[in-house]
Amino acid sequence: MFENTDDRTEQSINNIIDKKSEKESTKDSVYDISNSSSTGLNNGNCNCVDSNCISSDCMGSNYIHHKYINSNNIKSNNNLKFFNINKQWTIHGWKNFHLSIFLLRCINTIFIIFFPYLIVSRYDLEPVLSMLLLTTSIVWFFKMYSYHQVCSETRKLFIDNVDLNSVDDPSLDMHYIKTYPYCLNLKNHYTYILMPTMCFQFTYPRTEKIRWLQVIKHIINIICLLLLIKTTSEKYIYEKLQNIFIIEEFKSFQGNIKIVYVVDRLLQVCVPTLHLWFVGFLIIFHYWCNVLAELTKFGDRLFYKDWWNSISFADYWRKWNLPVHFFINRHINKPLICYGLNRKCSLIIIFIISAILHEYLISVPFKISSSGYIFCFFVIQIPLIQLTNNEYLKKHKTVGNFCFWFILCATGQPLILFVYYYTWSVTQAYHKRF
């Protein structure tokens, strides 16, 4: 199922385009199954900001792209390979669903999302382990959603009687699409579940063998960094926060003194908090994703870009978490745009969804009432994206990068940690009292 494929010949693609061009308009829905290099770059020519761009710089090399484009452009583009799809249905699969499939998806969602929530809410588990369980359930749900969408798109090829036999192409992509649904099996499904990607497709770039030495090195690095996180958090963060938020002493301060006191302690925990955030980012997106990639022979190792050089928050959100960015762009942003929403409305919806999920992943494990701080933090990102995405900062990249780091250090993770630790300490004091 997941094998490296040779390039599809352009002659096969032109044949199927010519056969369908008399029946369809000049704008056709296309299903791009190109298999480019694992770098996922298009010579750095893509400058979009969460737009419906289909360049590989925005979407990555191993993700299926969807866009209404002119069929003449298909013929002249030698870098992309397409086969035609009927325009009558939207490729994202939000229409024409069957009730039985919808019910099965609801049952599947209950098992993936609701059961972990019940376990975390009813049993007294460690907050970190609870957060890990809920995060895994969310990631699994995203993977299953993408899996369903791609299979739904492929199924509609047969419903619309698209003549796939006319494509004389030995590539494995077409082979699996022609043999759908017999190409699906549990082994390939769970291989995809373990892969460090949230976007399903029938084939991925694959490596020839597992480099076990690299796996061992990454695991050793993960263990060492986890010990570093434990030491730093206990020595430089937990004790300082604990001393700050002793409730009786904190309430005894007057208003002005309390503000100065909090700002002073906030600056003290700023550096170690950012240090923990960087280490956590390195563990997840560099070492752990590469461990999964090695074990599953996943060839595309582009999990993040140089977000530390970002000149705006739009640039940062595009670069720091590519698996999630690809999923959002493919399964949320593009469908919303296809349904008539503009890019700003799509951006607002995306950040509201992200805010709700992050609030859920923080409030439930720590068993605190939903205070809405994470939600507000994500909503504030919308005007920040607009403010930092201007021509002056684009021309003066050093100034833009400085503004990005100043805002991130002063009002980012340190402030969120500060506020939520205070909320958690109030909750703990309340439970001890009653």
Image: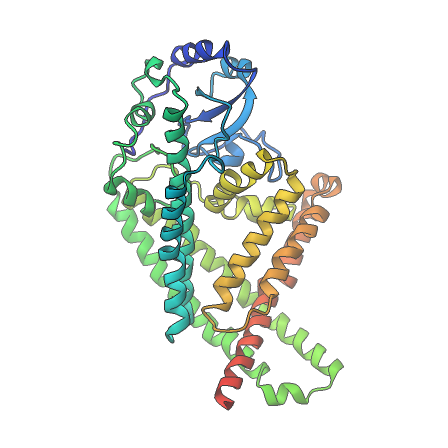
Measured as percent of width and height from the top left, residue 121 is found at: 42, 71
Q: Nearer the viewer, residue 147 or 322?
A: 147
Q: Is residue 95 visible?
A: yes
Number of labels in the image equals 0
Residue 186 is situated, as x and y percent measured from the top left of the image, at 24, 42
Residue found at x 39% / y 40%: 148
Q: Please tell me in which quadrant of the rendered image residue 100 appears.
A: top left
In percent of width and height, residue 404 lies at 65, 52
Camera-side residue: 62 or 312? 62
Q: Residue at x 29, y 35 (%)?
A: 207
Rendered position, 220 above or below 344: below
The residue at 30%/44% (across/down) is 294
x 67%, y 48%: residue: 385
Q: Is residue 344 left or right of residue 65?
A: right
> Is residue 287 something one can see in this rendering?
no
At which x and y percent is residue 291?
A: 33, 49
Q: How is the image coloured?
A: rainbow
The extreme front residue here reads: 99
Q: Is residue 84 left or right of residue 404?
A: left
Task: Using residue 318 as the reference point, say whether residue 364 is left or right of it.
Answer: left
Give the quarter of the figure containing the N terminus: top left
Q: Quadrant of residue 301?
A: top left
Q: Is residue 274 above or below residue 90?
A: below
